[in-house]
Amino acid sequence: GNSVTQMEGPVTLSEEAFLTINCTYTATGYPSLFWYVQYPGEGLQLLLKATKADDKGSNKGFEATYRKETTSFHLEKGSVQVSDSAVYFCALSDPGFNKFYFGSGTKLNVKP
Amino acid sequence: EADIYQTPRYLVIGTGKKITLECSQTMGHDKMYWYQQDPGMELHLIHYSYGVNSTEKGDLSSESTVSRIRTEHFPLTLESARPSHTSQYLCASSEWGRGLNTEAFFGQGTRLTVV
């Protein structure tokens, strides 16, 4: 079956620190992988995506690489800001059925 | 910018009342979803639709019902609200078709409180 596992939070960092949020997946077939971000009181916004192995998604300084050999899609950012404080969700979609599977979310707190 | 809208954003209602949460999208997407998000942040799929006149139950059992009479509109109804229905409800949409690698677009959510 399909599932997504991401590291538990909360993750607390100081401003300008390096961020990694781990995400691994199990899937049948060739899924697409996504990172979504949710700010307080809001819905989910797509942060980045990758649709095939070795693709790198990037946006707003965040990056993640689709690693088929390790079934991973870790989110990284070189220097976080206070405004990056939010909940981050890793997700995959089954292209056969467009069903989405979400991880449980990782809360990031960035302190000045 | 995603064009999917949910109303109301916040709703406080008494036990036993009937409520409808509205969700509309202007992207022409066939597939639409309703998720319930608990305070622990996890998302639970409660309903989805492949298109007009299609509705399916999701992974989490819910007392709510949905309808899809128009492509752009996917309302969720609770016939008799209870405190256990207190939650954040998120609507989403996506293109649909075999082999498509497309993301889901989310509305801003409705925070429902049943007192």
Image: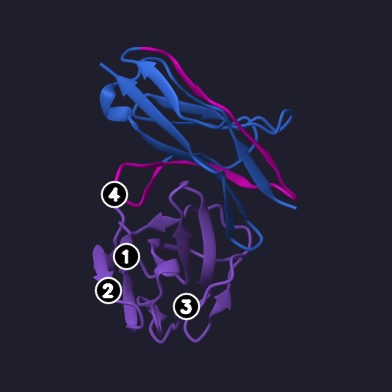
Helix, strand or loop at mark 3: loop
Numbered mark located on residue B13 in the image: 2
Q: Amino acid at mark 3?
A: Ser
Residue drawn 36% across and 83% down? B16
Q: Earlier in the sequence, mark 3 or mark 1?
A: 3
Q: Is residue B93 above or below residue A22?
A: below
Give the magenta-colored segment's residue range.
A17-46
- Specify whether disc 2 shares its chain with disc 3: yes
Tell me: A15 left or right of A7: left
- Specify whether disc 2 shares its chain with disc 1: yes
Tag 2 near tag 3, CB within 8 Å = no
Spot occupied by residue B21 in the image (x, y as percentages of width and height): 33, 74
Residue drawn 57% across and 57% down? B100
* Chain B drawing hue: purple
Q: Is residue A37 above or below residue A18?
A: below
Spot occupied by residue A107 in the image (x, y as percentages of width and height): 43, 34
Q: Amino acid at mark 2?
A: Ile
Chain under numbered label 4: A
Tag 3 near tag 1, CB within 8 Å = no
Which of the two discs, 3 and 1, sits closer to the camera? 1
> Would you say residue A32 sits in the magenta stretch?
yes
Chain under numbered label 2: B
Q: Amino acid at mark 1?
A: Thr
Which of the two discs, 1 and 4, sits closer to the camera? 1
Marker count (numbered): 4
Measured in 3D between alpha carbons, the distance from the residue under mark 2 to the one under mark 1, in whole angstroms, is 6 Å
- Residue pointed to by mark 4: A41
Q: Nearer the viewer, residue A94 or B108?
A: B108
